[in-house]
Image: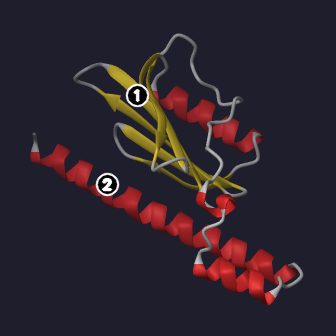
Amino acid sequence: MEPNNKLSKILIASFLIIAALAISLYATSLRDSSLGQKQKADPNTEALRKLGSNTKESSTPAPVVLPASLPLEKDAEILFDGATNGSVQTSKTYISNLSLEQNVEVFSQYLNKAGYFVLSKNTLKNQTIISAIKGQNNINITIDRNEQLERTTVTITLTALK
């Protein structure tokens, strides 16, 4: 592996970790500010929530699925499709027939029309990472162009922030 390529991968991994932390903090601050606007919960209910009750509702979160409206390419070769981290996160990775730039445009338009708030859009030479939030869901779209293999891959990860 070339030193430049290795450094790029380390920087990208570091950025993803920092972005995930920032998104979690942002979602927590949104949730906390909306709690202040609602009527205060019963003190016993609040205490149980803080202690992490073992009720079926809190221990069995609803599975996270990618929105059906996502502009996924038909007949694309799927490299990964499934849930990770239990049922609070789902991902799909596929080989795209579009260029990196075309994918950035398609997904940027989709996120805008679907009502997502784009937190960041970071572009490197052969990669763009778009991070957005809508309600309690965070979506990260990573578009990579591999010049050696002459292909573009798209990874979409949706995480429930509840």
- Does residue 91 sit above or below 29 in this rendering? above
Q: Earlier in the sequence, mark 2 or mark 1?
A: 2
Give the answer, above or below, for where 64 lies relative to 106: below
Callout 2: 10 Å neighbours few (<14), some, many (20+)?
Answer: few
Q: Quadrant of the C terminus?
A: bottom right
Q: Is residue 9 left or right of residue 90?
A: left
Query: Colour scheme in the image?
Result: secondary structure
Q: Where is residue 20 in the image (x, y as percent from the top left)?
A: 47, 61
Q: Please tell me the numbered disc located at residue 153.
A: 1
Of residue 137 and residue 43, the one placed in the foreground of this image is 43
Q: Which amino acid does label 2 sit on?
A: Ala
Name the quadrant containing residue 120.
Answer: bottom right
Left-right relation of 48 to 152: right
Query: Measuring 22% from the left and 23% from the top, which residue is drawn there?
Result: 148
Disc 2 on helix, strand or loop? helix
Q: In which quarter of the image is residue 43?
A: bottom right
Q: Can residue 66 be seen in this view?
A: yes
For the question of whether residue 140 can be seen, the reply is no
Tell me the element at label 1: strand
Q: Tell me the tag on residue 13.
A: 2
Name the residue: 49% across, 20% down: 98
Please name the amino acid that badge 1 sits on: Thr
Compare residues 160 and 24 and report the one nearer the observer: 160
Q: Which residue is the extreme one toward the top? A: 75
Residue at (73, 83) in percent of width and height:
46
